[in-house]
Amino acid sequence: MTARYILAVDQGTTSTRSILFDQSARLVAVRQLEHHQHFPRPGWVEHDASEIWRNLCRLIPETLHDAGIGLDSLAGVGIANQRETTVVWDRRTGKPVHQAIVWQDTRTSAFLESLADKAQSVRDIAGLPLAPYFSASRLRWTLDHVPLAREHAENGQLLFGTMETWLIWNLTGGTKGGVHVTDVTNASRTMLMNLRTLEWDPYLLELFNIPKAMLPEIRPSMDRYGTCTGVLEGVPLVGALGDQQAALFGQTCFDAGDAKCTYGTGSFVLLNTGPEVITSSHGLIPTVAYQISGQEPVYALEGSIAVTGSLVQWLRDGLGLITTAPEIETLASSVADNGGCYVVPAFAGLFAPYWRSEARGVIAGLTSYVNKGHLARAVLEATGWQTREVIDAMNADSGLTLRTLRVDGGMTANNLLMQFIADILDATVVRPMMSETVSLGAAYAAGLVTGFWPDLASLRRNWHRAAQWTPDMDPVRREREYADWKYAVTRTFGWIREPEPD
């Protein structure tokens, strides 16, 4: 093999990155560009999909230049992406008909309330709760609110996709024959796919009034989608995963019972459940973990936490208590505990395990004793407590007791937080040497298809531990403070008493 590298595209909520990996899974070069966040109304979050595509076209040549290589050195490209974000575009012009509506957006809450009597049937088919987090209601909103969108969608002029579909279509030719596909992990987050058949479900399409003509073909996560044109001329595009599934794969959680949590803007815990779809009775989401072409899918249970890293950003940008995100550890370490203060960041409702879109954030337990150090500590601890709630739900659903949690993402650099998580989970927390697990998962997907890596065992050999935290908290204190947290969470319920208009 003359090709010496795999290119991974990590298209995230705040930025897009282009990363080169060698056969040792070593990061060789990386380039990153942020894109604008648009907030046209309270609860609305949008991206410009064309801006994201332009950024990628700029990033890829810069990455190759940094490494001093040409396209002939690439074995393939894989994509990891922010999931659920909804893009609708015109196949003739290649232009989106509306801004991409982001996974954090809550504009469809009132519409979903009107479908409350269908909640169980949706969960039975798609495995998902009726929540604005998923793509279907945002796609419906686009068809209902953009002039001529429904008419054009029904005649096949409009295409729908999550971000990987949009990028694959553009990378493989766009208006000149771009491939319109999605992988099973992203499709499983649309609320339109049958979780067991891995096909678009007729009942769900009718329920949300979505024309099937605009939907992409569902393919395995590791498959030959097509050959790139333009900035990646001739390079095979051979892998795609939703970002959290990519992190699970990059952490080499290939066996049932393996679990990881990615700590970013939000945080996402995934537990590999093997070939079995485990239906959750504790507010978790069964989802497709990954599928290798020609093999049966692997499933996972997921607990999605909406606000973790973004809570630290709020402390910095909204309150001005810190000037950089890493400062929170120093400020939180200036006190011995939270002073009885709890921050529940239900900024746009609560995700797992509650799924309460009407909830809003609270700071509970405030007294004149509480200072900014206590507040900083409570902000960090909110991430830990939310993780504990999800892990408890996973243990209950799976019948397992988690003993080790693999972690990744920017917040894992905070040693105080990682120790707190180990303490309240009463489990070992492990961070790998390679922190870019989302990008690495996308690279692994592409590398398996092209033979760059021969098998899963070769990927496991690339995983190395960088840091580990073991529990060291009095059990009585752990459970007392956890009870206080859960009581604080109940104070967030029912804050929005009337449905928000769409």
Image (cartoon, rainbow, N blue to C red):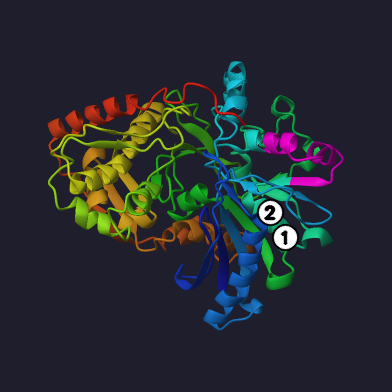
Is 286 part of what is drawn in magenta? no
Helix, strand or loop for disc 1: helix
Residue identifier under label 2:
166
Helix, strand or loop for disc 2: helix
Instruction: Indicate the position of residue 178 as horizontal and vertical percent values.
Output: 78, 58
Residue 170 - label:
1
Task: Judge by depth and name the residue closer to the eye, 417 or 22.
Answer: 417
Q: Which image quarter holds the C terminus?
A: top right
Magenta range: 139-159
Task: Judge by depth and name the residue closer to the eye, 248 or 318.
Answer: 318
Task: Name the residue: 70% across, 47% down.
Answer: 98
Q: Is residue 129 left or right of residue 294?
A: left
Task: Name the residue: 26% across, 50% down.
Answer: 418
Instruction: Indicate the position of residue 280 as horizontal and vertical percent values.
Output: 47, 26
Q: Is residue 87 above or below residue 20?
A: above
Main SS of the magenta segment?
A: helix
